[in-house]
Image (cartoon, rainbow, N blue to C red):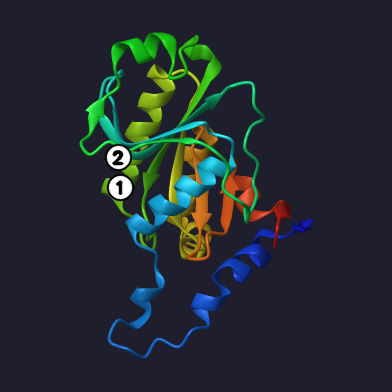
Amino acid sequence: MSTNRLMSVRSLFLRLNHDRTSRKTNDTLGRNDLWLTEGQLVLGVEKFIKLSGYQKIEFNQTLNQGGYQFTFPIVGYRNSSQDDLNGIVYQGQDNGYTRVQNQEAKPMEGERKASGVFGEDASKTTTTVCIINPKIQDYDLGFFGHLESILYDIIDNYENTNLILVTDSLSYLSIITKEEISVTVENLMGEGLHLLFMNEKSDYAFFEKYDDIIEKPITVYGV
């Protein structure tokens, strides 16, 4: 039976990263072998989206309704009447869901924009799109500029659509301690960006507000 309790964010990430940061890495790969790959993160975020109550998942989905065209490795859809996500760590069983694998990136059909993915008013559907960056260690002007463009395009052109930046939990320290990264992430989260951290055990820490990453104790589930 899982237990729910409050935990400081720093303590949470010490727990999330403990096995890897304390591991001996004297082989030829060094410490680089500790980081999750993009493929591992996609598999992890798929589980996270399922646990969050999304009834449909698509892969390699292109959104081109706004001024730009962006392709996302994973997109989830659910009924908007469900509760919002909270800042939590997940460890749970898989629930039923619909998995659609797109081998090639394809634009969203016009009828989907009008009627939603469940054959109902699109305003009743919440869409979550995910962008993956496994290793955030140094400020990457190109990446964060791209992320900003995606976020503002979604805000301006897509209803009930959230953007999640998915990264390895080892990225946490850089995000909170390196000024250029922390300022940029704080500004983007103020505009609506969400953050999802994960480790190799499929533990998750999800945040909607930057202040929660720094200060506020959060509720932890199943740890």
Q: Residue at 44% across / 49% down in the picture?
A: 166
176 and 68: which one is in front?
68
Q: Residue 63 is drawn in which quadrant? A: top left
Residue 106 on image: x %, y %? 23, 28
Determine which of the numbered discs, if any, sits on residue 146 in the image: 2
Dot 1 alpha-carbon crowd within 10 angstroms: few under 14, some 14 to 19, many 20 or more = few
- Label 2 element class: helix
Give the spatial CA distance, label 1 vs label 2: 5 Å
Dot 2 alpha-carbon crowd within 10 angstroms: few under 14, some 14 to 19, many 20 or more = few
Residue 28 on image: x %, y %? 27, 86
- Label 1 element class: helix
Name the residue beneath numbered marker 1: 143
Residue 213 on image: x %, y %? 61, 52
Residue 184 visible in the displayed image:
no
Q: Residue 96 is drawn in which quadrant? A: top right
Horizontal side, residue 192 vs residue 141: left or right: right
Q: Identify which amino acid the numbered label 2 is placed on.
A: His
Q: Exactly how many numbered labels are in the figure?
A: 2
Decide: is 108 above or below 37. above
Q: Are marks 1 and 2 in contact (CB under 8 Å)?
A: yes
Horizontal side, residue 56 vs residue 1: left or right: left
Q: What is the residue that sits farthest to the left in this orientation?
A: 104
Residue 174 visible in the displayed image:
yes
Q: Residue at 45% across / 46% down in the picture?
A: 46
Q: Residue at 59% across / 35% down in the picture?
A: 53
Residue 184 on image: x %, y %? 44, 46
81 and 102: which one is in front?
102
Q: Identify which amino acid the numbered label 1 is placed on.
A: Phe
Screen quadrant of the N terminus: bottom right
